[in-house]
Amino acid sequence: MGAGRDHPAGVALLPLPVSVPQGAGRRRSFSWRPALLTATLLVVSTAATAQTESPGQTLKRVEQDLQSDKALQRQLDRQSQTLQKELDELRDRLVGLADQERAQEDELAHLEESLTALETQERNQAEKLEGERQQIAALLAALQRVARIPPEAALARPDGPVDTLRSALLLRDTVPALRARADALAQALTRLAETRETLQAQRSRTYAARLTLIDRQKEIGQLVARREELSRQTEEERQQVAQRTARLTGQAADLRQLMDRIEAERRAAAAMAAKREAERLEAERREAERRLAEQRAAEQRQAEQKLAEQKAAEQRQAEQKLAEQRAADQRASEQRAKAEAETARAAPSPPAGERLPVGGRVTVRYGEADRYGATSRGVTIQARAGSTVVSPQAGTIVFAGPFRGYGQILIVEHSHGYHSLIAGFGRIDTAVGRRVATGEPIGLMPADGSPDLYFELRRHGQPINPQRGFGAPEGKGQG
C-alpha cells in the first residue's frame, strides 16, 4: 500500500474516536482533534513541497508520520484494555448475582413446600371439625326432642318405669360428655384459626420471595445485555486496531522499498567490503578453532584418564551405598504402605460433585435409564421456569445454537481436555468464541412449566459422571 495510492505521502492514518465505558452509565470520550489538525497541516505541506523535497527529506517526513500513527495505536490499545477490565468486572458481578439467584430459588422452593404442608394441615383440620360438628348437632337435636316431652306425658307413656329410668340416666350421662366434646371443638377451632394465621403469614413471605426473585432475574438480564454491548464494542475496537496495524505495516514496507532504491549502490559496495572482511575473519576463526581443538583434545585425554580412576573408586562406593539404599528403600516402602492404608481408612468420602449449571432436582443420574430407556451419559435436572443457567467451569464457547433433536445446546471447552454439553435452554446469552468464568450466566431456562436441563461432561471425548466433578480420573466413562 504505497503513499501514492490510498493516502498522500506523509499523511497520518488516524483512527476514529472511541468511547470507553466507565461504569454502568458513564462514558469517557477521547478527542483527537490535535491529531486531525496535524494531518490537515501535513496534507497542505505535502501539496506545497512535493516538487521541492529531496528523497531524504521525504523519507524523514514519512518516518515521523509513522511514529505518530504508532502513538495513536498505543492509545487505542490502552482504551481496549480499559474496556476489557470493565468487562471482567461485569462478569464477576454476574457470577455473584447468579449465586444469589440460586440461593433465592432454593429459599422460595422451601417456602412453597412449607406452604403446601400448611394448606394440607388446614384442610385436614377443617374436615375433622366438620365431622365433629355434625355429630354434636345430631346429639343436640336428640336431646331437644327428649326435653320437649312433659313429665305427665312421660308417665303416661306405655313404657314401664324401668325404661323411663333408663332414659333419664342416659340423658344425665350424655350432657357432660356433650359439654366435653363442645369444649374440645372450641379448642380445635382456636387451633384452626392459628393455623390459618400461620398460613397467611407464610403466603406473604412466599409472595415477597417471589417478588425478590423476579427483581434479581431482571437485574441479571440487564447486566447480561450490558455485557453483550461491551463485548461487541471491544470486538469492534480490536478490528479497528487490526486494520490500522495492517495499514502501518504497508507504510513501513513502502519506506523500506524507498530506502532500498535510494541507497542501492552504497549498500552493494558496503556488502562487497563486508564480504571480503568476513572471509578474512572466517579464515582466522577456523585457524583459531583448529588450535583450540588440538588443545582441548590433549586436555580431554588427561581428563579421561583421571575420570577413569575416579569412576573406579566411585563404583566401589556406589556398590556399598546401593546395598544400604536398598535396605532403606525396603523399610520406607513398608512404612508408606502402612501410612497409605491408614490414610485410606481415615479419608472422607468424595464430594458430591462440582457446580451444576442450574439449581433444581436431579431426576436422572449418570448411568441410569432415561425416559427413552437408554443409559444416560449425563444428568437431567428439573429446574424452575426462567432460571439462570451458569457455566459449571471456566472455559471457551465452541458451539451455541440448535442441534438436531436436542433443541438449543451449548458446548464449553475447559482446560485439561474437558468439555461440557448443556441442552434444554429457553434462551442462550453468549456466543461462539467467548471466554466465560466459573458460575457466569450463559442463558435462561424456558419461561413456562417445569423445564429439564441436560448436562453431560466429557474428558478427551469420553463421558464421565458430572456429579463427580472435573477431578474425575482419565479414561472411559466413570460410574
Image: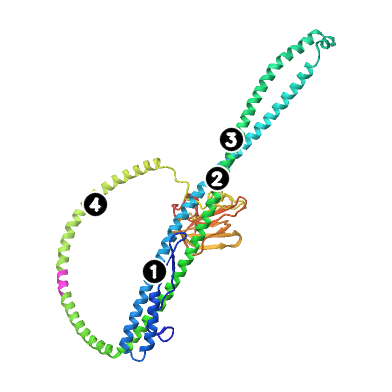
Determine whether the residue tagged by mark 1 lies in a helix, strand or loop. Answer: helix
In the image, is 179 to the left or to the right of 72? right
Q: Amino acid at mark 2?
A: Ala
Q: Earlier in the sequence, mark 3 or mark 2?
A: 3
Q: Provide the residue span drawn in magenta.
A: 294-300
Q: Is residue 478 visible?
A: no
Q: Which residue is mark 4?
A: 322
Q: Residue 421 in the image: x percent, y percent?
A: 52, 58
Q: Amino acid at mark 4?
A: Leu
* Nearer mark to the viewer, of 1 and 4: 1
How far apart, in angstroms, are the residues tagged by discs 3 and 4?
80 Å
Q: CA distance from mark 2 to mark 1?
A: 45 Å
Mark 4 / mark 2, whichever is N-terminal: 2
Label number found at residue 209: 2
- Amino acid type at mark 3: Thr
Magenta stretch holds residue 1 = no
Question: At 56% across and 62% down in the image, what residue appears?
Answer: 401
Residue 108 in view in this figure:
yes
Q: Cα distance, mark 1 to mark 4?
A: 61 Å
- Badge 4: how crowded within 10 Å, few (<14), some, or many (20+)? few
Mark nearer the N terminus (3 vs 4):
3
Neighbours of disc 1 within 10 Å: few (<14), some (14-19), many (20+): some
Q: Which mark is residue 198?
A: 3
**The N terminus sits in image quarter:** bottom left
Question: Which residue is labeled 1 in the image?
Answer: 77
Picture residue at 69% right of the left edge, 19% below the top: 178
Q: Nearer the viewer, residue 227 or 349?
A: 227
